[in-house]
Image (cartoon, rainbow, N blue to C red):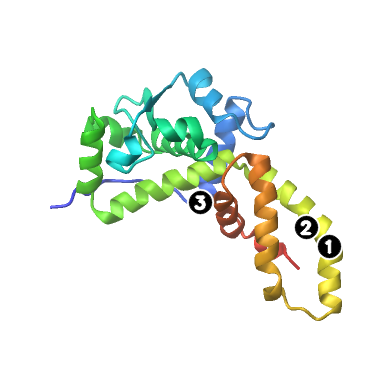
Amino acid sequence: MALKLEISYVSYDELRSLTLSFLKKFRMDQNIPVEIEELLECKLKKNICPIPGLLDTYEIDGWTSNDLTTIYVDEFIYKSRETRYRFTLAHELGHIVLHKDIYETQRISSVEEWRSFCKEVDETSYAWLESQAYNFAGLILVPSVHLEGHFQKILNKFRPRFEAASRKRLTKDKYIDYFIDISSIQLSSIFNVSQDVIEKRLIKDSLITRIP
């Protein structure tokens, strides 16, 4: 029988407020990109431990010890995939903040046990665990107030192009994908995250509705 977990519902807006308060608490809300490694190691006193072959062997980027003191990360991602590494740390921080009781209750002491736990949890519980941690990671690495400000600057720069498109009677669907792609590339560089993270945030935060 699949393992069902008691997971408290946390809305996206609540996560937005939580991550902002979290950054403010440690005075890391003003500068971007957010120094997630510094936040974990220096502010929260968490250990970051690279593990060779973690992704290849267990198909996971990272996991957190049951006592919440150590985040294990695939060594190749740690060394060679900066944005993925940063997101993995933020994702695990999401688990630490949101799912502390679950980690402490399960008492998972190895990556093998963690992998088995993931397989035993029922699909709904696992989906909640991961989606909450994913949203937490995206929000803490790309704080809403900074995202909105930088996105608006890009919109303003593109204003002449939008006006030209309007004069040519081009509908929004003709250029929206191009604009999202261009803006996501620029924003991903600013926040030091993947383009995919930015694209999902633009949709999730309804920022694309601002495109004329």
Query: Residue 90: x percent and y percent?
Result: 48, 36
Label 3 vs label 1, nearer the camera: 1
Instruction: Classify 10 Å Cα crowding around label 2: few (below 14), some (14-19), many (20 and above).
Output: some
Instruction: Classify 10 Å Cα crowding around label 3: few (below 14), some (14-19), many (20 and above).
Output: some
Query: Residue 167: x percent and y percent?
Result: 86, 78
Query: Residue 110: x percent and y percent?
Result: 24, 29
- Residue highlighted by disc 3: 12
Q: Residue at x 61, y 39 (%)?
A: 192
Query: Residue 34: x percent and y percent?
Result: 61, 33
Q: From the viewer's perspective, tell me whether residue 210 is left or right of residue 128.
A: right
Closest to the observer, 34 or 180:
180
Q: Residue at x 77, y 57 (%)?
A: 155
Q: How many numbered marks have been drawn onto this rendered protein structure?
A: 3
Q: Which residue is farthest left?
A: 1
- Residue highlighted by disc 1: 159
Give the residue type at disc 1: Arg
- Residue highlighted by disc 2: 155
Q: Which residue is farthest bottom?
A: 169
Secondary structure at numbered mark 1: helix
Give the residue type at disc 3: Tyr
Q: CA distance from mark 1 to mark 2?
A: 6 Å
Secondary structure at numbered mark 3: helix
Closest to the observer, 66 or 19:
66
Give the residue type at disc 2: Leu
Q: CA distance from mark 3 to mark 2?
A: 25 Å
In the picture shown, does residue 177 fall above or below 70? below
